[in-house]
Amino acid sequence: MCLEHAHGKKCVPQKHLMRDAQIRQMKNANFVMVREMTDKHFGSCQRGFHIVFSNGWCMDASIGPGVYCENRYGLDNNNLPEVVESDDCETIVQDNTGHDRTLMIGMALGLRVDGEGESGVLPYLKFENWLRVFDYVRQQEAL
């Protein structure tokens, strides 16, 4: 899902996956996320990757500066290493209609969530918990 970060620099828009035939724009604070229909299940971006499940739901794993992970503050945006690694990540989940389901899933699984209203993130998510979210999302019905 590669949500662009509030680092004050212009980001290159990233294309994202969605089974819905319409192009959707979701605006939030400092980024615009554009998704378009495709039959691909994996996508990458500047700070991680995302997966689109057969049910149309999408989840990501983001790491790096400005992202809620162990190296949120430890790396320079202007001088990133070729490979960025982390023991945890920030994750966001959307259903097949493009609605953010991160807070709902975080609460259902008893995980820490940051956010307001209907949108949020699962911050500092360790791999074992990321797999729990993965299993939960892949078992959801398309809406």
Image (tube, rainbow, N blue to C red):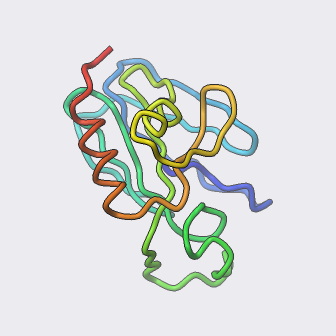
Q: With 29 as the anchor, is 21 left or right in this view?
A: left
Residue at the farthest right position: 8
Measured from the top left, where is residue 29 in percent x and y? Answer: 75, 40
- Which quadrant of the figure has residue 109? top left
Q: With 50 as the anchor, is 42 left or right in this view?
A: left
Look at 67% across and 32% down and name the residue there: 27
Residue at the farthest top position: 143
Q: How many marks?
A: 0
Residue sitting nearer the eye, 75 or 13? 75
Measured from the top left, where is residue 102 in percent x and y? Answer: 49, 36
Look at 27% across and 49% down and name the residue there: 42
Q: With 71 as the anchor, is 18 left or right in this view?
A: left
Q: Quadrant of the C terminus?
A: top left
Check the image and report above or below for 124 versus 91. below
Measured from the top left, where is residue 126 in percent x and y? Answer: 41, 64
Check the image and report above or below for 69 versus 73. above
Look at 35% across and 18% down and name the residue there: 21
Look at 36% across and 24% down and name the residue there: 96
Residue at the farthest front position: 110
Measured from the top left, where is residue 120 in percent x and y? Answer: 60, 39
Check the image and report above or below for 115 versus 24. below
Q: With 15 as the anchor, is 44 left or right in this view?
A: left
